[in-house]
Amino acid sequence: MALPKPDELLQNVNLNRTPSQHWMDIKTEFKPGTYCYAVEPQVMKDLGLPNLGSWQPHDEKWPLPENWKEIVRDAIKTRMERFRSFKLFMDICVRCGACADKCHFFLGTGDPKNMPVLRAELIRSIIKGEFSTFAKLFGRFAGARPLTEDVIKEWFFYFYQCTECRRCSVFCPYGIDTAEVTIIMREILHELGIAIDWAMKPVRFSHFIGNHIGIQPHTMKEIIEYLVADIEEITGVKIEVPFNKKGAEILFVPPSGDYFADPGIYNFMGYLILFHHLGLDYTISTYASESGNFGFFNKLELAKKLHAKIYEEAKRLKVKWILGGECGHMWRVWHQYHNTWYGPVNFLEVPKSPITGTVFEHAKDNKIIHICEFTADLIAHNKIKLDPSRNDHVIVTYHDSCNPARAMGFFEEPRFILKHVCNNFVEMPENTIREKTFCCGSGSGLNTDEYMEMRMRGGFPRANAVEYVHKKYGVNHLACICAIDRAVFPALMNYWVPGVDVCGVHELVGNAIVLDGEKERTTDLRYRPLKGKEEEV
């Protein structure tokens, strides 16, 4: 499906327009570009989940099981009893609307059902209609409605128009976590066999192979060897990468997007250059080869399984602690769910930098730190030889990736690094960064091509802030520490802000590091000429 031109896409978006009908009377319309394709039945079978066979959301009649209402009621009841937070969120919302204009999908579509307050009402109204005697008697006047097939379609449509970014919860006076509501609603849909293809295939691949794209161990090794060859051509230094090395001090777990996709591959080259420069005793596993957790987008039990896989590999390889790459949702799962699922890990050591001696006490339970923490600590102790002028062709701004920033308060380390490896760093407007950062518009498994119109709509608020610094300061690079951001931002920038490239923080670190024995560098890791070296190249 061809996308409308940028100046046409938002023409009919009116955030102040009152719908002509009550929201309960407006039926969901599946137009191309506004929904994701249904999951293949074999994927659900492989994961031990129900499936509906072959179907698509635009089908007039969905092949729901005969007892689908009973399944949904039981699923809701189970989660209301199991998750105290879910029950609380359903009870305490006062419909103040503070969240309404904070959602990037509402800003990009103008659809009231994309306001977090109304998106939650899609399930709250059914809880009232099915479990409250008072609400059953008074119906719509009490905010209740019956459970119908149209409701299931509506749930599918709108709970896959939430990227679980949690920007709305920053502004909610009660701290309602819409991401938790979305995850639970997707779980309930799973009970019927309803899911989207691009969110579930990565779970299957991660579960059976080790990474979300299904790259086999030998292929991963070959790809990384190609990147090593590029590093040698650019720097003159040959790097050895240790795979599946038993007894190494550190297990490094990158997001798979950083070793197979542009622009993540340049970020991976930056990791390798850094580790070689330090003489770090580390290993990369070809079996637990994904720091991202795609189960988290869909079902908490699936997230728990994928999370455990990395620790089993750490145990097998007999490492001391784990270093995570530039990944977003990895960070929230590890630091906000790990202890609930497993408690402290007792077979690993508290992470301690072998270079600076810094002990990362906040990781004493889960034994993992983020590579930006690690690198910021190195720079603070003057342990890396850097030449920031090698990034003088870059004017960079920084996108706070939702999960590390909003969920973890992870604000300063990436900025500290960027300011030391680049001479030209610019912040976007204050109300669009840090805990108020806008989402990429494609997270939580929505970064699929058939969803491109919604991705461009949802990503517009982020792109709008980038356009501001692009026009005012000449910003030509958007840096981020999330593999999904690096995967989806190029399309978003090409659509809304042509002329802005996307990169990871450690790509710029790799450009700036001065390696022992290197030849004179004339290009960056993308083979682009450094400033002043254009004629030589």
Image (cartoon, grey):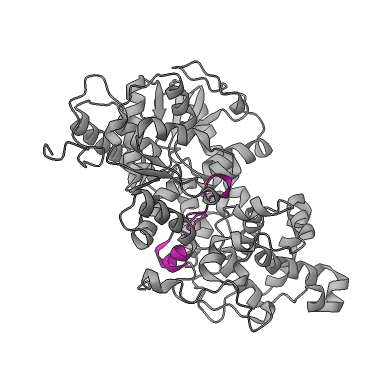
Residue 24's place in the image compared with 264, above or below, is below
In the image, taking residue 201 as reference, residue 94 lies left or right, namely: right
Query: How far across and how far down the image is residue 202, in percent?
Result: 46, 52
Q: Image quarter for residue 419?
A: top left
Place of residue 243 in the rendered image (x, y in percent of width and height, measured from the top left):
36, 30
- Who's the residue at 36% across and 48% down the image? 473
Horizontally, is 358 left or right of 7 in the view? right
The question of residue 438 being in magenta is answered with yes
Please indicate, yes or no, whether residue 488 appears anywhere in the rendered image: no
Task: Say whether residue 272 is visible.
Answer: yes
Q: Is residue 72 above or below residue 347?
A: below
Q: Of 336 and 8, which appears nearest the observer?
A: 8
Q: Nearer the viewer, residue 54 or 486?
A: 486
Quarter of the image with the C terminus is top left
Left/right placement of residue 317 relative to residue 223 reads: right
Based on the picture, tell me whether residue 492 belongs to the magenta stretch. no
Q: Residue 430's x, y, as percent?
A: 53, 48
Which quadrant is home to the N terminus? bottom left
Give the residue at the far left of this rendering.
535
Range shown magenta: 433-457
Nearer the observer, 467 or 320: 467
Q: Residue at x 44, y 50 (%)?
A: 484
Q: What residue is rendered at 79% in x and 57% in y? A: 92
Q: Residue 72: percent from the left, percent from the top? A: 70, 66
